[in-house]
Every structure is written in structure tokens, then in C-alpha cells.
Amino acid sequence: MGLTTDLVNGIVSLVISVAITVAMADEDDGPYDLSDMALAVAITGFLSGFFTSYSAK
């Protein structure tokens, strides 16, 4: 139950973070592309959800 719960929490955090970022992002030209930003948010969202769940035990 431990590792699978942590992975699920990481995936849920990833989906929520990316969905909000893509929905709120501007289409203006900036220093970063939307796909680059979504990838960065996906990585940090997953790690945040995973390690928060892992360390809360």
C-alpha cells in the first residue's frame, strides 16, 4: 500500500498542476514555450505530491 499510494498521489498532483498551468497560461511570446513550462510543472508537481505523501507517514 505504501509505494502505490505515493505514486497515485504524485500522479494526481501532476495532473492538477499541469491542468491549472495550461488553463491559465498566456499565449504571448515569452522566454519559455508552453510545452517547456508544462514539463517543468509536471516534474515538480509529481515530485511534490510523491514526497509529501512519502514523508507524511
Image (tube, rainbow, N blue to C red):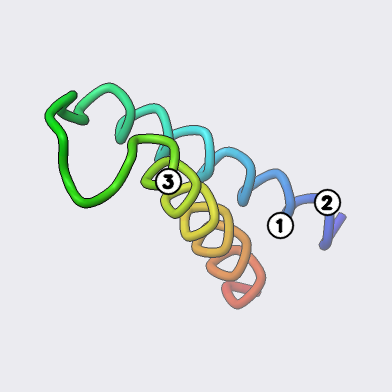
* Mark 1 vs mark 3, CA separation in Å: 25 Å
For image coordinates 50% across by 63% down, the residue present is 48
Q: Which residue is mark 1?
A: 6
Circle 2 SS class: helix
Instruction: Please determine whether, in this image, residue 19 is positioned above or below residue 2.
Output: above
Q: Residue 41: percent from the left, percent from the top?
A: 42, 50
* Mark 1 vs mark 2, CA separation in Å: 5 Å
Instruction: Please determine whether, in this image, residue 8 is positioned above or below residue 56.
Output: above
Circle nearer the N terminus (1, 3): 1
Q: Which residue is mark 2?
A: 4
Q: Which residue is mark 3?
A: 36
Q: Is residue 4 left or right of residue 48?
A: right
Q: Residue 9: percent from the left, percent from the top?
A: 62, 48
Q: Is residue 50 left or right of residue 40?
A: right
For discs 3 and 2, the disc positioned in front in the rendered view: 3
Q: Residue 37: percent from the left, percent from the top?
A: 37, 46
Q: Crowdedness of circle 3 by 10 Å Cα count: few (<14), some, many (20+)? A: few
Q: Amino acid at mark 3?
A: Asp
Q: Crowdedness of circle 2 by 10 Å Cα count: few (<14), some, many (20+)? A: few
Q: Amino acid at mark 1?
A: Asp
